[in-house]
Every structure is written in C-alpha cells, then in structure tokens.
Amino acid sequence: MTPTNSCVFCQAVVPASSMEMTGHGWRRNSCTQQSELAALQNKGNMAEHLTQDELANIASSAQKEVVSGALLTFAGAAATIASLAIGFRGKIVIACAAAFLGGICLLFRGVSDKREAQSAQSQFPSARTMQS
Ligand SMILES: [Zn+2]
C-alpha cells in the first residue's frame, strides 16, 4: 500500500511521494506549483509562511499604522493650512506637507497590510494545525 498524506493547504489526500514538507506540514506538488506561480506574479500569500499568531500580530500592527497614519494625515493637513494662513512660506510649509503625505502613505500601507493579513488568516485556517 502506498503511503498517503493530506495536504495542509487543500486537504487533498495524495501519495506521500508527490508531496513536500513545509513549515505547516505536507503540501502536494500541485499546490507548490500554484504557490510558485503566484509568487512569480507577485501574489504570494502570507499564510504559506506565517503562523496564525504571526498573522494576528501583523494585522494588529497594521491597525496601529492605520490609526497613526490617519492622525499624521490630519495633523499634517492642519499644520499646512495653519502655516499658510499665518503667512509662513518655504521650508515650514514643505515640512508640514511632507508630514501630510507621509501620513497618507502610512495609512494606505496599514490598510493594505491589514487586508492581506486578514485575507491570509481566513484563507487557510486549517493550514495552521499540523496534521499527521
Ligand atoms: Zn494542496
């Protein structure tokens, strides 16, 4: 009898000889190929490499980036408007506008990271537990 194992990513039961060991357990070759294709297309999935706790940490710090980014965007915009209203020109206005733009970047990065981490969490919930 050929030894079989179930793939931690798709749960298909296939001969162990057509699988490889990953950090989460056995993965069948076709899932490996799909993963490599996705990586080539820049659509890599966090769930393949990170544990549930690590994904939760990423989602949590991304949420902090969203809040910090929103505050920095608001403060930068207010400071830019205020410095222009007072009559400042030049470096002070540029610095305030840079804070505003930095805030927007942080906000979008946080939203993107949080979305990716949450998607990874929901996509492979069963991949988080080792199967024998
Ligand atoms: Zn699979």
Image (cartoon, helix red, strand yellow):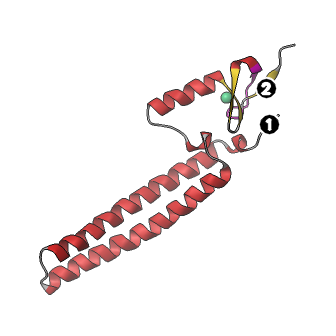
Asked if one can make out residue 15 in the rendered structure from this viewpoint, the answer is: no
The picture places residue 98, in percent across and down from the top left corner, at 26, 67
Q: State which region is magenta.
A: 8-16
| Element assignment for label 1 | loop
**Contact flag, marks 2 and 1 (Cβ < 8 Å):** yes
Q: Earlier in the sequence, mark 2 or mark 1?
A: 2
On screen, residue 35 above or below 127: above
Q: Which residue is mark 1?
A: 131
Compute the Cα span from label 2 to label 1. 9 Å
Q: Which residue is mark 2?
A: 5
Asked if one can make out residue 90 in the rendered structure from this viewpoint, the answer is: yes
Magenta stretch containing residue 19, yes or no? no
The picture places residue 21, in percent across and down from the top left corner, at 70, 30
On screen, residue 57 above or below 3: below
Label 2 Cα crowd, 10 Å radius (few <14 / some 14-19 / many 20+): many
- Which residue is at the far bottom? 86
Which amino acid, by three-letter code, is at mark 2? Asn
Q: Which quarter is ligand 1 in? A: top right
Q: Residue at x 49, y 53 (%)?
A: 113
The picture places residue 13, in percent across and down from the top left corner, at 76, 24
Image quadrant in which you'd find residue 58: bottom right
Which amino acid, by three-letter code, is at mark 1? Gln
